[in-house]
């Protein structure tokens, strides 16, 4: 189903595009705007972005596919991204992953049937001094333990 | 060290240190007076003389890099800030942007003036939403107070600064990958030469500098190159924000002059080892060759000592591992990381990282023989220096150093090659 941007979003995009000598440079910002407005980057959203930026849908697709933070699948209300790289591994990220996988019955890349939680192990989040850590949507949660992870999930559920 | 004054972290603990008001009260933007009193070429000479090296990992002299920018070409010049902090083990730029964004802006003004740039982009990794908001707020404040925009403080110098948000790709920390990404493309590094200083963003001369490099510049402009060069060691002048993560009792970051012994860093700042004796240190982010405890005995936190120990200073953030660490599992973690983050452009890197990861998986499952360890080393040889950027080498270094220095950790998972041959014969 075709999607269109709100007027305000188009205006915001034009302000951003003016910062660059070429319009194509505003493709990453345009994808961010699309993700904010539509919740994720569907193929329809990619087409809308291509019209906005003035490039081909294929160009939008290759960029959207290259960067992991653009959600090509609709994420849950809370997107749990657990860091699994070295400093977090040394401090127990495997256990944090296990808690999430068992408590929410999720495998990497999956979403709970009620659409509340999605789960994705990710690479270094640059919070190595407070390992293990995870990002829930935009927020960092650090120095995690299996207990604090359980509590965090329970708290999010109640919200 | 007694007379050492923090330059990069002095506002980290200050209440509202990120606001323009507090920044000005604590000596912020003071370097601009000296800056605009001098010619751009003089600023470049000053920074060259200070010996400031790039803090992003490669350690290239900052002043020299700036001097490569051709002038009067009729093209715009760009300064792009590399704030795509993502090297595993590295986590200090996030605080520079969060607690002292104006210091970075001051550094951007200094560098832009020196290279005659009027548009600068700060490329921040996508996860740093808080940092992006802080930077945008700081830019707005600075514009209102005429520290950015037209005719900055009556100097006749114009500068606009914009934040560009990344979207999750480690390779965009590589400077030409970053420029591709800034231009709205996949972050696949470019063939060099031409180097970005000649042909960078949008086909124009461009300097890419790390957050800490630029944050170090105002102090140099304000206090002079000689004062800066007097701090730290001869080859590693100045201060840096050093980080500790992994198996120490107190992880964190501390600003200090270069030259502190690694063991003192672990004992005094890290409050000693957690869970057992020291086994290994990755000194400056996961791409640096790993060091054994023995090698760390006379290691200091400086570019030259790291080089003498056949590793790299990298980002100055060390990952510490205790005696119970299974180095095979750690290397598996790294091969997975590099396999995941390879941009896929060059065959030796795309295939090599995947093969290293597959072999590590086989080793950990107990199915491999000791011959496969040698195969991993051979693949590493075929990865290093064979590709467009250094990503491929950045996996070859840990593979080689892990297997050579901690071979017993890998061999315990492996069957002797002769056993494997016998198994094959009996199976047939």
Image: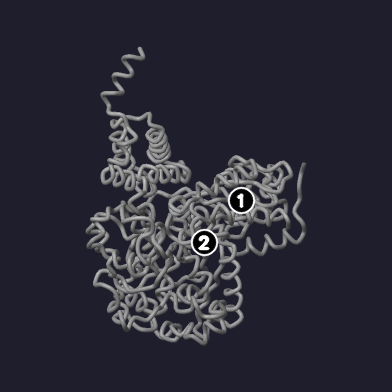
Question: What residue appears at the point 41 percent right and 33 percent down from the top-left corner?
Answer: B365
Q: Is residue A23 left or right of residue B228?
A: right
For the C terminus of chain B, the image quarter is top left
Q: Quadrant of residue A140?
A: bottom right
Could you tell me which secondary element the residue under label 1 belongs to?
A: strand
Please state the chain letter of the residue tagged with numbered disc 2 in the rendered image. Answer: B
Camera sees residue B176? no
Q: Is residue A10 left or right of residue B33?
A: right
In x, y percent, where is residue B22?
54, 84
Disc assigned to residue B123: 2
Question: What residue appears at the point 33 percent right and 64 percent down from the top-left corner?
Answer: B266
Residue hosting label 1: A80
Distance CA(mark 1)–CA(mark 2): 24 Å
Front in this rendered view, residue B324 or A3: B324
Q: Residues within 10 Å of mark 2 (few under 14, many from 20)?
A: many
- Looking at the picture, the colour scheme in use is one colour
Same chain under badges 1 and 2? The reply is: no
Up the image or down, A108 lies above or below B262; here it is above
In x, y percent, where is residue B403?
29, 42
Pointers 1 and 2 in contact (C-beta within 8 Å): no
For the N terminus of chain B, the image quarter is bottom left
Question: What residue appears at the point 28 percent right and 70 percent down from the top-left corner?
Answer: B259
Please state the chain letter of the residue tagged with numbered disc 1 in the rendered image. Answer: A
Question: What residue appears at the point 43 percent right and 52 percent down from the top-left corner?
Answer: A90
In x, y percent, where is residue A7?
77, 59
Number of numbered markers: 2
Q: Quick one: which residue is furthest to the top in this view?
A: B428
Camera sees residue B266? yes
């Amino acid at each position: 189903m075709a999607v269109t941007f709100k007027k305000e979003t188009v205006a915001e995009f034009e302000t951003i595009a003016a910062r660059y000598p070429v319009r194509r440079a505003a493709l990453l910002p345009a994808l961010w705007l699309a993700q904010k407005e539509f919740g994720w980057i569907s193929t329809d959203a990619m087409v809308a972005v291509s019209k906005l930026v003035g490039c081909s849908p294929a160009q939008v697709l290759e960029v959207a596919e290259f960067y992991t933070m653009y959600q090509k699948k609709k994420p849950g209300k809370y997107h749990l991204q657990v860091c699994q790289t070295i400093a977090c591994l040394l401090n127990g990220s495997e256990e944090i992953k296990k808690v999430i996988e068992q408590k929410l019955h999720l495998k990497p890349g999956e979403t709970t049937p009620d659409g509340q939680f999605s789960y994705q192990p990710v690479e270094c989040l640059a919070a190595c001094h407070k390992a293990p850590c995870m990002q829930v949507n935009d927020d960092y949660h650090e120095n995690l333990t299996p207990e604090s992870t359980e509590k965090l999930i329970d708290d999010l559920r109640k919200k | 060290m007694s007379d050492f004054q923090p330059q990069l972290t002095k506002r980290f603990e200050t209440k509202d240190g990120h606001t323009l008001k507090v920044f000005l009260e604590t000596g912020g933007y003071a370097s601009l007076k000296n800056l605009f009193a001098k010619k751009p070429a003089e600023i470049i000479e000053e920074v060259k003389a200070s010996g400031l090296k790039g803090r992003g990992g490669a350690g290239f002299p900052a002043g020299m890099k700036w001097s490569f920018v051709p002038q009067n070409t009729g093209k715009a010049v760009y300064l792009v800030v590399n704030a795509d902090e993502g090297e595993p083990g590295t986590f200090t730029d996030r605080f520079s942007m969060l607690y002292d964004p104006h210091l970075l802006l001051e550094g951007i003004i200094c560098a832009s003036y020196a290279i005659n740039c009027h548009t600068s982009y700060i490329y921040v990794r996508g996860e740093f939403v808080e940092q992006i908001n802080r930077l945008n707020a700081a830019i707005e404040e600075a514009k209102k107070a005429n520290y950015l925009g037209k005719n900055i403080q009556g100097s006749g110098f114009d500068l606009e600064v914009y934040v560009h948000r990344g979207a999750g790709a480690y390779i965009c920390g590589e400077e030409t990958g970053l420029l591709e990404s800034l231009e709205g493309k996949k972050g696949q590094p470019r063939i060099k030469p031409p180097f970005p200083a000649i042909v960078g963003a949008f086909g124009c001369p461009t300097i890419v500098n790390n957050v800490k490099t630029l944050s170090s510049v105002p102090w140099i402009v304000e206090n002079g190159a000689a004062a800066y060069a007097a701090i730290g060691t001869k080859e590693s002048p100045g201060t840096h924000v050093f980080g500790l993560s992994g198996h120490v009792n107190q992880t964190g970051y501390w600003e200090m002059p270069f030259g502190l012994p690694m063991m003192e860093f672990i004992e005094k700042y890290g409050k000693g080892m957690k869970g057992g004796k020291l086994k290994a240190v990755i000194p400056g982010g996961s791409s640096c060759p790993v060091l054994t405890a023995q090698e760390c005995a006379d290691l200091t936190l400086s570019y030259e000592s790291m080089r003498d120990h056949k590793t790299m200073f990298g980002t100055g953030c060390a990952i510490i591992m205790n005696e119970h660490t299974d180095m095979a599992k750690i290397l598996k973690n790294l091969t997975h990381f590099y396999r995941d983050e390879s941009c896929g452009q060059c065959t030796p890197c795309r295939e090599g990282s995947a093969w290293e990861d597959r072999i590590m998986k086989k080793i950990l499952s107990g199915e491999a023989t000791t011959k496969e360890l040698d195969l991993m080393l051979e693949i590493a040889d075929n990865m290093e220096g064979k590709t467009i950027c250094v990503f491929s080498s950045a996996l070859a270094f840990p593979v080689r150093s892990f297997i050579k220095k901690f071979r017993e950790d890998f061999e315990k998972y492996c069957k002797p090659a002769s056993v494997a041959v016998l198994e094959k014969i009996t199976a047939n």
